[in-house]
Image (cartoon, helix red, strand yellow):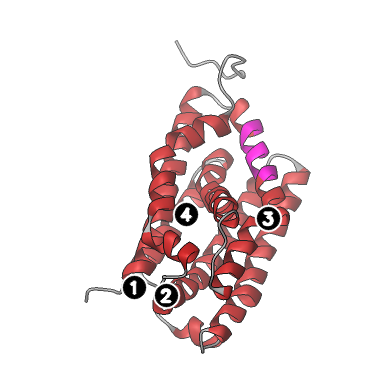
Amino acid sequence: MSEPTFPHANRQPFSEELWDAIGPIYQAILAHPFITGLVDGALPRDAFRHFVVQDSHYLRDYARALAICAAKAPAEGDVRAFAGDAVGAIAAEQQMHGAFMADLGGSAEQAATLPVGPTTRAYSSYLLATVYGGSFLDGLAAVLPCYWIYARVGEALLERSSPDPLYRRWIATYGDEAFQSVVRRVVALADRAGDEATDAQRSRAREHFITTSRYEWMFWNAAWQQESWPI
């Protein structure tokens, strides 16, 4: 018998299913020395600089991924929202990271000339392959951790802040209500899209969500290790 294609009223909201699936990953992120170093101010500047450079590279591909999500979005409002988020990702790369690089004794132009690291390349490649080749729900699940985990980390860290003004500014960016409201909108869309999906479609999308959540941990770990290509 083929799987029913109608919504299942007795299923939990898709966002709850997704977040439950990454509970241990999120706790590992909060406990990572890169994150705890932001809060206590002990994070080495070189590690933060590595993060800013790689995040600048990553956000260019993330903007492309969001643009593809916009093209596949089922509703006009969602098309506009994702297109706006794609523009916002580029703006963040140009403005926020440029300001951080200036504080770190460099520039956005200099960051653009530095190599894309192994984890950054792997993460962005997986992301782009998923949004290009998968369904709208697949792509949404793949891009969602970069929204949602940063919002939850920013929210958690905002309560503790940091003695370092540079790290305090980074925390405030993601703990800010403006960013939190954007994330709530995308999470609500995940619930709507997930409600219309079959169990098999939700399961496949959940695997993408788990994978890119793991890449989020790996991204911070790469910065902590100041990862470079081995050869």
Left or right, 229 with reference to 183: left
**What secondary structure is the stretch in magenta mostly built from?**
helix
- Residue located at (50% from left, 35% from top): 18
User: Tag 2's secondary structure?
Assistant: helix
Of the pair 133 and 157, the residue shown nearer to us? 157
85 lies above or below 27: below
User: Tag 4's secondary structure?
Assistant: helix
50 lies above or below 2: below
Q: Give, as a three-letter code, the residue at label 4.
A: Leu
> Which of pointers 1 and 4 indicates the residue nearer the eye?
1
Of the pair 126 and 13, the residue shown nearer to us? 13
Q: Report which quarter residue 54 is drawn in.
A: bottom left
> Which of pointers 4 and 3 indicates the residue nearer the eye?
3
- Residue located at (63% from left, 32% from top): 191
On residue 226, the disc is 1
Magenta span covers which residues? 184-192
Residue under label 3: 179
Q: Are marks 1 and 4 in contact (CB under 8 Å)?
A: no
On residue 50, the disc is 2
- Residue 108 appearing in the image: no
Q: Are marks 1 and 2 in contact (CB under 8 Å)?
A: yes
Name the residue at the left extreme: 231
Residue under label 4: 127
- Residue located at (50% from left, 81% from top): 112
- Residue 198 appearing in the image: yes
Question: Which part of the image, by quadrant, shows the N terminus?
Answer: top left
The residues bearing labels 4 and 3 have C-alpha atoms spaced at a distance of 21 Å
Q: Earlier in the sequence, mark 1 or mark 2?
A: 2
* Mark 4 nearby-residue class (10 Å; few <14, some 14–19, many ≥20): many
Q: Give the percent coordinates (x, y) of residue 12.
A: 56, 22
Q: Earlier in the sequence, mark 1 or mark 4?
A: 4
